[in-house]
Amino acid sequence: MLVDNHNRTINYLRLAVTDRCNLRCNYCMPSEGIDFAENDKLFTIDELIRLSQILITQGITKIRITGGEPFVRKDLMVLLRELSKIDALEDISITTNATVIGPYISELKALGIKNINVSLDAITKDVFEKITRRKQYDIVYENIIRLITEGFNVRINCIALEGQNINEIVPMLDLAKHHNVCIRYLEEMPFNGGSKKFTAIAWDYKRILAHIAETYPDYYQLESPKTSTSINYKIPGFIGTFGVIPSFTRTFCGSCNRLRISATGDVITCLYAKASTNLITALRGENSEETVKENILKAVGNRAKTGFEAQENYKGVFSNSMTSIGG
Ligand code: SAM
Ligand code: SF4
């Protein structure tokens, strides 16, 4: 079992499989993209399988596949097929922009993958396409409806962006009115590849909730797992639910059970922390299993208590992009 220096059990790995993406969401990266990693700096699929196996022996029971956009990796299904064979792995989840997931939906279902988070920051086509800087709305919407209809547990991630999609917050809830889906509103974080700097946000979770209450005053809170980052709610008469994630105000650090590994091998023990170590050389060298395990134990044994403490190492300048971190 992995237990950090603040007595938090770590059993959830967010594993980024690429830093590349076919969208250019303006809160995530600049329009020209970032300096994407060279191919040989990314884990191969075999390495991702081996790394996952090692971490599972250390106590990881849930893996979320993220990126970049995971499905731009043509060999992603090879990883998912292997992971789905591991009994000790209780949950495989995916975070995706749903642009190119279509051809894989049947196999994902057959593999028993249930939890899929999709980023959708607007329900209005031109607002979505302005934010993502690509014309992919129709296919994303179609894939979301397919995923819901096929019975996946779909959660929509929508970041509240001042001046961009605030008028979308309430209309987005229509999806939850008619479908079994959870719409989760996130606070914007400063990991956008340097395109915009800020130290405060206009839309924190309390303001998002107050805004929703103007239209739906009778929503009520649902019970959520202790390690959940979202606070979840139901509006009477709606099939689905909604939630807020205090990703900038960080009220959830006390129960954090997550570890992040980037596609280039960085071990990130908190979203707001710089990488503790890099595993590429360790995994490619001799005695790789022992060395990787030692590195993980060291990183987990030296975690910041909160995101605010972790952030101190940045000294106020966040130049990295969420496409490298994995969200
Ligand atoms: N491409 C996939 C997607 O968009 O779902 C997976 C990777 S993306 C980096 C993972 C999550 O990070 C998404 O839900 C996205 O909305 C979120 N994200 C990206 N940049 C963010 C930012 N600056 N603040 C808050 N969330 C962000
Ligand atoms: Fe791509 Fe996801 Fe970043 Fe949007 S949020 S640019 S879809 S990695």
Image: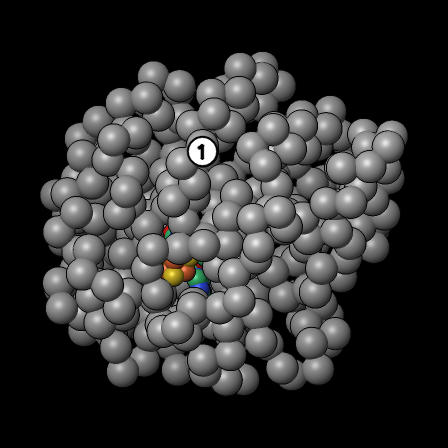
- Which residue appears at 21% of the width and 48% of the height? 140
On the image, the x and y values in percent for residue 135 come to 18, 61
Give the residue at mark 1.
76
Q: Which one is nearer the viewer's eye here, 149 or 126?
A: 126
* Residue 253 appears in the rendering: yes
In which of the image's four quarters is ligand 1 placed?
bottom left
Residue drawn at x 83%, y 55% is: 302
Q: For this view, does 236 lie left or right of residue 283? A: left
**Quadrant holding the N terminus:** top right
Mark 1, ligand 1, within 8 Å: the answer is no
In the rendered view, would you say 42 is above or below 153? below
Task: Name the spot of residue 127 as percent of width and height, x first.
Answer: 18, 70
- Which residue is nearer to you in this view: 279 or 230? 279
Which image quadrant for residue 171?
bottom left
Query: For mark 1, does the 10 Å Cα neighbourhood hold few (<14), some (14 to 19), or many (20 or more) residues?
Result: some
Q: Quadrant of residue 108?
A: top left
